Image: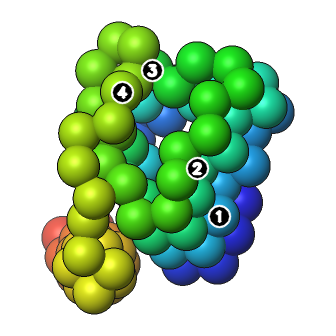
Amino acid sequence: IGDDVSIGHNVVIHGAKIEDGALIGMGAIILDHAVIGEGSIIAAGAVVLSNTIVEPGSIYAGIPAKFVKKVDPEQSKEMNQKIARNYLMYSEWYKEKKG
């Protein structure tokens, strides 16, 4: 798993390569020997089959996951940064509530 990758809740990654800046949506399943290219987005609930190569900067969705469209690299980066900020915000909120 590369740098600056966002992985949603309940994701299964089994023997796959996830390159830098990828975003894996909640509940997605990434199977053996799949490669998720840099800056790509895998939609929530998608199933990426074994040996699938997701080209960098692509959006994949569905069961089985299929190419939907190319994503602007800057848009993908902004989404990952927003997700990271949200998790920090939620952790602070939780700590305050548990106080």
Q: Which residue in the protein does label 2 denote?
A: 36
- In the displayed structure, 44 sits above or below 71; it is above
First in residue order: circle 1 vs circle 3:
1
| Residue 39, image quadrant | bottom left
The front one of 41 and 8 is 41
- CB of mark 4 within 8 Å of CB of mark 2? no
Percent across and percent down for residue 90 are: 23, 71
Q: Residues within 10 Å of mark 4 (few under 14, many from 20)?
A: some
- Which image quarter holds the C terminus? bottom left
Q: Residues within 10 Å of mark 1 (few under 14, many from 20)?
A: some
Residue 97 shown left or right of residue 42 in the figure: left
The front one of 91 and 12 is 12
Gap in angstroms between the C-alphas marked 2 and 3: 12 Å
**Mark 4 vs mark 3: in front:** 4
Percent across and percent down for residue 44 are: 28, 35
- Label 2 amino acid? Ile
Q: Residues within 10 Å of mark 2 (few under 14, many from 20)?
A: many
- CB of mark 1 within 8 Å of CB of mark 3? no
Q: Which residue in the protein does label 3 denote?
A: 47
Residue appearing at x 58%, y 49% in the figure:
36
Residue 69 shown left or right of residue 50 in the figure: left
- CB of mark 2 within 8 Å of CB of mark 1? yes
Q: Which residue in the protein does label 1 denote?
A: 19
Residue 11 shown left or right of residue 23 in the figure: right
Gap in angstroms between the C-alphas marked 4 and 3: 9 Å
**Element at label 4:** strand
Gap in angstroms between the C-alphas marked 1 and 3: 17 Å
Identify the disc placed on residue 66.
Answer: 4
- Which image quarter holds the N terminus? bottom right
